[in-house]
Image: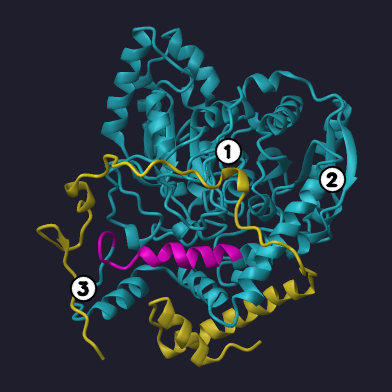
Chain colours: A cyan, B yellow
């Protein structure tokens, strides 16, 4: 019976690699066999780094032989394609950057490399991270490994699908309004958005600078703790990076949750929740209560304004961040332009997809003279109130529990023509971005159609250790993470 | 609030985007629908509330204004669509 190393977690593989029962080279070759067999069906990767990853694996094996290793040495990791990897195409799922090759590594990539990790490829994503289904990518939609007619979620659909399909051991995604957590819940994996400032954004192609986060997608909570620890920490290259000490997130898992107060906000449990999701979360709360946690009803009164607040702020910031794509210094440039302004307009109109253009238009509108106060400034004030809601709630609880999404994965093509409807499905996730709070999605069961459901745990600022502890206890009681997608 | 075709053109101009008349018409419908939804924010009482733009704990990292190594010129130009010596070459501006 062949040992299926590509199914294993970072911590399981760490043991095998150090004991030399598996080599990093064999591991990455096995992962690539899996990629070759299945990645086309799921359309997970925009590009792969076969030769570079084998070279990195050989180096990892040399390090291990010399007695030098860390938790990530030799571990194959996939990277969402809006994070700069030196020498690898970084496309952001867009024609605008279809041939863009950064000459530097993002800080998170530097940290992975110095930890001996093996980067296997760049994963598919909604264009410039704008989307909740990975359907707006120039490379085509990413398909859900649990059901290929369904979306993998977005915008980190590829990163989630890669982990769920065993096409990598773990991945890094990004989350601006839920883009790590929602695909994690749709694909049955763990997805964590850290506190804003916990992980450096240097080298992350900006969508909305006050809302963007980089975070791990993994098979289990222990792996999320390990990967989060590896990428966290102050970075002088990112002026929004927090100067906060990084705790040992893995050590935090060992403490139990007796007496932990779980805040349940009534605004997240409306009639709009799919019955299977409501039932799954209710069952999960029962498991947590039986482990000694205490249920505390709380209220987050401004929740119903969160989607409007988020989309006004995110599109305004995006209109500013995407102004740099002008065809001058890098990226796509329209051909045969006789005049500068013509070049700007034809470059941008020709290379951005329709969702990106729609959001740039919305954001530009929100910032124009005469509308700035009514839209952008108003949204920023409501953002303050949303943050205060959480501050009040955290006086009565240690973590807040909600569904990650109102429903499981929809069909490909179902929602893409109705942007507002897609925006409204982000209702469970956007508030954590607006308030800068850490949040994780853990698998908590399946719908009657066999699609994964996710439970979201939101923590207070810089308290990833508390939310990881809650997530870990739940996971160990239920073992949902041991289920495998039926992808052949 | 009703977004007119004229308003769409003005915003497109600011964003350096170009749309056909049909695209503008479709955009006006979509933007109207979305902005109507955003108007729900007018229900929120925000008098005296400070706008939140970022977490203050993370802000304001300064360093002495010393020269630091940065990208080499070749790296700067590594993705340039059109380079001439150490310049990015672009079409000229025609005053109109």
C-alpha gap between disc 1 and disc 3: 45 Å
Local secondary structure at mark 3: loop
- Residue A301 on image: x %, y %: 83, 58
Q: Chain of mark 3?
A: A
Callout 3 crowding tier (Cα within 10 Å): few <14, some 14–19, many ≥20 = few
Above or below, B36 against A322 in this view is below
Q: Where does label 2 land, which residue?
A: A264
Residue at image mark 1:
A485
**Which chain's residue wears label 2?**
A
Left or right placement of residue A128 versus residue A415 in this view: left
Q: Position of residue A379 (x, y in %)?
A: 67, 67
| Magenta-drawn segment | A313-331
**Numbered disc in front, either 2 or 1:** 2
- Magenta stretch secondary structure, dominant: helix
Residue at figure coordinates x 44%, y 46% from the top left:
A44
Q: Determine the image quadrant of residue A237.
A: top left
Residue ID for mark 3 = A335
Location of residue A313 (image quadrant): bottom right
């Amino acid at each position: 019976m062949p040992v299926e190393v590509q199914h294993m977690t970072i911590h399981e593989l760490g043991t095998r690699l150090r004991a030399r029962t598996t080599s990093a080279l064999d591991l990455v070759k096995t992962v690539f066999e899996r990629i070759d067999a299945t990645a086309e069906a799921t359309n997970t990767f925009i590009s792969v780094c076969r030769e570079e990853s084998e070279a990195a694996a050989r180096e990892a094996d040399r390090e291990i032989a010399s007695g030098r290793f860390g938790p990530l040495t030799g571990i194959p990791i996939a990277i969402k394609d809006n994070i700069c990897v030196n020498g690898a195409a970084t496309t952001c799922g867009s024609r605008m950057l279809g041939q863009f090759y950064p000459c530097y590594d993002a800080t998170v990539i530097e940290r992975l490399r110095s930890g001996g990790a093996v980067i296997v490829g760049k994963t598919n994503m909604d264009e410039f991270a704008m989307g909740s289904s990975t359907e707006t990518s120039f490379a085509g939609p990413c398909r859900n490994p649990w059901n290929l007619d369904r979306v993998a979620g977005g915008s980190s659909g590829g990163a989630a699908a890669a982990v769920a399909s065993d096409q990598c051991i773990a991945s890094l995604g990004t989350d601006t309004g839920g883009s790590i957590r929602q695909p994690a819940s749709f694909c049955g994996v763990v997805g964590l958005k850290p506190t804003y400032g916990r992980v450096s954004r240097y080298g992350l192609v900006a969508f909305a600078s006050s809302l963007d986060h980089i975070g791990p997608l993994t098979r289990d909570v222990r792996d999320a703790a390990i990967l989060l620890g590896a990428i966290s920490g102050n970075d002088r290259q990112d002026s929004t990076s927090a100067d906060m000490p990084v705790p040992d997130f893995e050590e935090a898992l060992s403490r139990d949750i007796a007496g932990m107060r779980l805040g349940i906000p009534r605004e997240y449990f409306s009639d709009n929740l799919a019955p299977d999701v409501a039932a799954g979360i209710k069952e999960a709360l029962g498991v947590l209560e039986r482990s000694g946690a205490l249920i505390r009803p709380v209220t987050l009164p401004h929740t119903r304004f969160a989607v409007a607040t988020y989309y006004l702020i995110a599109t305004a910031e995006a209109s500013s961040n995407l102004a740099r794509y002008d065809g001058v210094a890098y990226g796509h440039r329209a051909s045969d332009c006789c005049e500068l302004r013509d070049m700007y307009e034809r470059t941008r109109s020709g290379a951005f997809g329709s969702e990106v253009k729609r959001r740039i238009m919305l954001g530009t509108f929100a910032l124009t003279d005469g509308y700035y106060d009514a839209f952008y400034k108003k949204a920023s004030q409501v953002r303050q109130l949303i943050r205060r809601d959480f501050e009040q709630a955290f006086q009565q609880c240690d973590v807040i529990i909600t569904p990650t999404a109102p429903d499981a994965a929809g069909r490909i093509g179902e929602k893409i023509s109705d942007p507002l409807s897609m925006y409204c499905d982000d209702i469970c996730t956007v508030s954590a971005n607006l308030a800068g709070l850490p949040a994780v999605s853990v698998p908590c069961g399946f719908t009657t159609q066999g699609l994964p459901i996710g439970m979201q745990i939101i923590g207070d600022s810089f308290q990833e250790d508390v939310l990881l502890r809650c997530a870990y206890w739940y996971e160990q009681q239920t073992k949902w993470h041991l289920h495998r997608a039926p992808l052949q | 609030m009703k977004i007119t075709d004229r308003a769409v053109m003005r915003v497109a101009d600011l964003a350096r985007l170009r749309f056909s008349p049909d695209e503008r018409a479709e955009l006006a419908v979509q933007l109207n629908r979305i902005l109507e939804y955003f108007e729900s924010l007018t229900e929120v009482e925000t008098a005296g509330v400070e706008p939140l733009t970022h977490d203050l704990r993370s802000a304001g990292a300064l360093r002495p204004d010393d020269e630091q190594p940065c990208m080499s010129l070749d790296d700067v130009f590594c993705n340039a669509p059109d380079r001439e010596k150490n310049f990015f070459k672009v079409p000229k501006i025609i005053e109109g």
